[in-house]
Amino acid sequence: MTSTAIRFGVWAPVHGPRAALNDPDEPFDASWEHNQAVILEAEQLGFHSTLIAQHTVNPHLPDHDQLETWTAAAALAALTRRIEIIAAVKPFIFHPVFLAKMALQIENISKGRFGINLINAWNRIEFEKAGIPFGEHDARYEYGREWISVVSRLIAGESVTHRGQHFSITDYKLTPRDLHRARPLIYIGGESEPARSLAADHGDVWFINGQPLADVTALIADLRRRPRQGAPLRFGLSAFVIARATESEAHDAYARLVDLAAQDADVHALQRRNADPKTVMFQTMAKSVRVGTNGGTAAGLVGSYDQVSERILAFHKAGIELFMLQFQPLRAEMRRFAAEVVPRVRAAGQVAASPALSTV
């Protein structure tokens, strides 16, 4: 059981809606203006974090817009005051020295509200069209392990000399260092064995894709059994929320999104063709009908306000600290969640009082 207060986050709409791409209540919009408005409102509503996914081209509709992660993170760091900004990164695209420099800059712009989300990548076409080798799944994690070992030392202010399989770095030190804490937080995504091992060794928080409580409990138990240096690993969960006054209303809203998502069958087929078949996320998602990405509604946060609140508390009891949430239509449902669900969870004394981060 965790004693850490619950934090709520929201996925930034960097490549459009998360559940259905042809929703009359949520027209496609991946613009900077839309993302800025969403995150500023999320901060005002009391959300603690936002996650900015990292793609160079839109993974759903290759001819549609895709917001760039790290420039957006820097801009949001300057515009916001309380919300944590987590930027995803695929190690093959950025040399660790220069990524670490960007991370420190954004950390200091935000005054200590920045996090790095290391992901392994699944969309091979994004790499191949750029002429970047898309290695085998476990080999990509080995690369990521060496990559984050360099980044974590640089963002902690060390002078780094490193001789490895992929990088050769001599007496490199970045200034100014982190002016607000030891270093930015490191979030690790992925549920394969290499991902779990990497999270245990190098992560501060492990992101789990949406799935039933029993499966999440087993995943957390596995990570807690593993040897680890430093502070205990913390846990986050991705989930799509559909909360209404009654369970019946919630399931009607769910059915609407399922029907709309069915119109995206050709998009889903394209994703499967472009995805690494060893990516555990897609294997998990194939187990159930769901809406949303990264497990979506498989976490079961569909129901009445009371039911959704109770399920959040059950996940928290199992060890989840940060709930990274998806909604559609995004802004209207964020408001509903903040008005109806958060007060119910707060009444149990479990919500962080205001957007605030633990230091590492």
Image: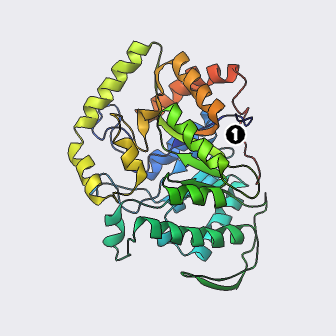
Measured as percent of width and height from the top left, residue 277 is found at 33, 57
Kindly identify the amino acid type of the residue bearing the numbered disc 1. Answer: Pro
Measured as percent of width and height from the top left, residue 37 is found at 51, 42
Task: Give the colouring mode of the picture.
Answer: rainbow
Q: Is residue 274 left or right of residue 324?
A: left
| Residue 30 appears in view | no
Which residue is tagged 1?
355
Which is more toward the observer, 89 or 336? Answer: 89
| Residue 351 appears in view | yes
Secondary structure, mark 1, is: loop
Q: Quadrant of residue 126?
A: bottom left
Q: Is residue 96 left or right of residue 11?
A: right
| Crowd around label 1: few <14 · some 14–19 · many ≥20 (10 Å) | some
Q: Quadrant of the C terminus?
A: bottom right
Q: How many marks?
A: 1
Measured as percent of width and height from the top left, residue 32 is found at 46, 52
Q: Quadrant of the N terminus?
A: top right
Q: Quadrant of residue 150?
A: bottom right
* Vertical comparison of 295 with 257: above or below: below
Measured as percent of width and height from the top left, residue 350 is found at 70, 28
Who's the residue at 56% across and 55% down the image?
196
Who's the residue at 32% across and 30% down the image?
257
Q: Is residue 143 left or right of residue 288?
A: right
Which is more toward the observer, 328 or 231? Answer: 231
Q: Quadrant of residue 313?
A: top right
Who's the residue at 52% across and 72% down the image?
143
